[in-house]
Image (tube, rainbow, N blue to C red):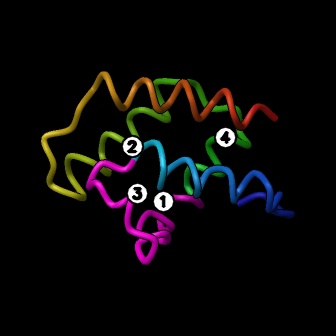
């Protein structure tokens, strides 16, 4: 993990996961705001390392399909990766 955490970037990733990615549909539930927080550290590292679209997609796809047991939505996940890369340009 990087030495010093950019809390603004970290928060941006967490919010993007909750409001834009949201594969289990909890974005409308205020009490669920931290539902995806366990995925932020890995995404933060990938973003800081300027990982390519495919690497970030593969991580999220594994979370959706293997970890969460969902069918996954490739188009939506790819669109989210593009969104995430755009809002987190470092």
Check disc 1 and report the residue beneath it.
39
Earlier sequence position, callout 4 versus callout 2: 4
Check disc 3 and report the residue beneath it.
27
Q: Considering depth in this image, is 55 or 33 the residue closer to the camera? A: 33
Q: Secondary structure at mark 2?
A: helix
Label 2, label 1: how many angstroms apart (C-alpha)? Answer: 9 Å
Label 3, label 1: how many angstroms apart (C-alpha)? Answer: 16 Å
Label 4, label 2: how many angstroms apart (C-alpha)? Answer: 13 Å
| Residue at screen point 78% across, 58% down | 2
45 vs 53, left or right, is right
Q: Secondary structure at mark 4?
A: helix
| Residue at screen point 44% across, 24% down | 79
Q: Secondary structure at mark 3?
A: loop
Q: Quadrant of residue 35?
A: bottom left
Earlier sequence position, callout 2 versus callout 1: 1
**Magenta stretch, main secondary structure class:** loop
Outermost residue to the right: 4
Report x, y in % for residue 67. 24, 58
Above or below, 12 against 50 in this view is: below
Within-10-Å neighbours for mark 2: few <14, some 14–19, many 20+: many
Label 1, label 4: how many angstroms apart (C-alpha)? Answer: 12 Å
Within-10-Å neighbours for mark 3: few <14, some 14–19, many 20+: some
Q: Are marks 2 and 1 in contact (CB under 8 Å)?
A: yes
Report x, y in % for residue 77. 37, 32
Q: Quadrant of residue 8?
A: bottom right
Check disc 4 and report the residue beneath it.
47
Q: Considering depth in this image, is 31 or 3 the residue closer to the camera? A: 31
Q: Which mark is residue 60?
A: 2
Earlier sequence position, callout 4 versus callout 3: 3
Above or below, 82 against 41 in this view is: above
């Amino acid at each position: 993990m990087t030495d010093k955490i950019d809390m603004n970037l970290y928060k941006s990733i967490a919010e993007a996961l909750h409001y834009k990615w949201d594969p289990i549909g909890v974005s409308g539930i205020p009490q669920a705001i931290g539902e995806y927080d366990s995925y932020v550290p890995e995404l933060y590292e990938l973003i800081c390392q300027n990982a390519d679209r495919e690497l970030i997609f593969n991580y999220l796809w594994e979370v959706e399909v293997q970890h969460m047991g969902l069918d996954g939505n490739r188009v939506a996940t790819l669109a989210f990766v593009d969104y995430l890369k755009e809002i987190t340009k470092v």
